[in-house]
Amino acid sequence: MKKVLITGGAGYIGSTVASALLDQGITPVVLDDLSKGRAEFVEDRVFYRGDIADAALLDRIFAEHPDIDAALHCAARIVVPESVSQPLYYYRENVAKTVELLESLQRNGCTRVVFSSSASIYAPTPDARVDESCPVDANSPYARTKQMMEQVLQDWTRGHGAEEVRVITLRYFNPIGADPRLRTGLQDLHPTHALGKLIEAHATGTPFTITGVDWATRDGSGIRDYIHVQDVAEAHAAALTRFDEVIKPAADDRYRVINIGTGEGTTVRELVTAFERAVGTTLGTREADPRPGDVIGCYAGIDTARDLLGWTPRRTIDEAVTDALAWRTKWSTHLAAS
Ligand SMILES: NC(=O)c1ccc[n+]([C@@H]2O[C@H](COP(=O)([O-])OP(=O)(O)OC[C@H]3O[C@@H](n4cnc5c(N)ncnc54)[C@H](O)[C@@H]3O)[C@@H](O)[C@H]2O)c1
């Protein structure tokens, strides 16, 4: 593949994917409305500012780049609490607008699509490990938009007029870190995930609270599957390179789901230890009961990614934390100066 459309390519994951593709000689064509994406992340890239539902803009992009081989659909609204308070907004942005995007892709003959989905659609399992055959039961409007879109995409590949359409859905687990070359990273200096809370605790000298210490995990704390965002980006490159092997053009079933995680997960205590190694000091921690609604968490079975994409993650949790901290330093300096 030589050229790929990336929606949301000015955002955290999409911009890292774009960098990884450039490194492999694939040209990303970025479409982003910059509602959350950053102009700095697309400065030296082919970039169209606009909405994924803007059919005329999509037609113009394909007219100007008739050699686009595939589309990576990363654009979405992603904040779970916001999706609870504004569900209709989320269903419009993530579902209705994606349907319009798919119509534009079909009209312009773009038949290879890679979709950014989320592990948050999985139903909890007793041992926290989930593979692609595990039941889904999304528990927020945000996650339901992902679950719904997966169904829409699968139905699309079965419909009349889309006989050549093939879709690979990548279910990401918990991307952290930044491009190791620090071209891009998280736009937000105060992320709400556990690493963000660790950074906050370290900066303010307050103890970090481990909520839930009796889960059925190797050390009793909850588990997530934090994965270096560069590994996630390289999974996209692998999906593009292997696309026609993963789903052959005339295959009966032209829809595949693939987990993108580490295969082991990281417990909260392990994340704390990795953070302490990265900053070189011990962090005060205290233990507390789980908060209402807390769950054991989950981590990915990644046999499918290994078998179909020939991909496995290459970076450690320590590298992810170190790159997150390095990016934070660079980005906060940039924001202060701009
Ligand atoms: N970050 C995570 O932990 C995570 C986990 C699992 C899945 N995902 C999925 O990965 C994808 C990327 O997430 P991210 O963390 O990079 O988020 P992000 O907010 O950084 O990136 C999303 C980008 O899409 C753009 N966008 C949103 N709506 C748009 C629209 N209608 N038209 C054009 N551009 C639009 C935003 O400006 C932003 O740049 C999303 O689909 C998300 O659901 C993210």
Image (tube, grey):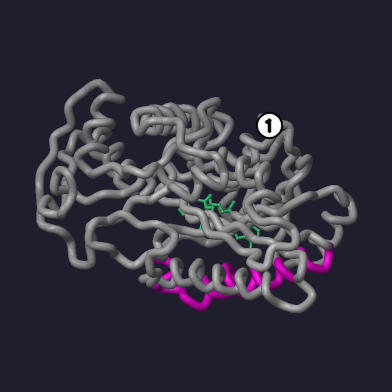
Quarter of image, res 63:
bottom right
Quarter holding the C terminus is: top right
As shown in the figure, which amino acid type bears the numbered disc 1?
Answer: Gln
SS for tag 1?
loop
Q: At x 18% / y 31%, what residue is drawn?
A: 283
Q: Is residue 33 visible?
A: no
The x, y position of residue 219, in whole percent, is 14, 43
Residue at the extreme top: 280
The x, y position of residue 114, in whole percent, is 63, 55
Residue range in magenta is 81-108
What secondary structure predominates along the stretch shown in magenta? Answer: helix
Q: At x 40% / y 57%, what residue is drawn?
A: 131
Viewer-nearest residue: 71 or 312: 312
Q: At x 29% / y 42%, what residue is drawn?
A: 266
| Crowding near the residue tagged with mark 1, few <14, some 14–19, many ≥20 C-alpha atoms within 10 Å | few
Left or right: 130, with 270 as reference point: right
Viewer-nearest residue: 312 or 70: 312
Q: Is residue 152 above or below residue 212?
A: below
The x, y position of residue 313, in whole percent, is 46, 36
Q: Where ligand 1 lies, by quadrant?
A: bottom right
Q: Is residue 219 magenta?
A: no
Q: At x 42% / y 46%, what residue is drawn?
A: 261
> Which residue is identified by label 1?
24
Quarter of image, res 198:
top left
Q: Is residue 149 above or below residue 222?
A: below
Q: Is the CB of the residue bearing disc 1 within 8 angstroms of ligand 1? A: no
Left or right: 92, with 132 as reference point: right
Viewer-nearest residue: 224 or 337: 224
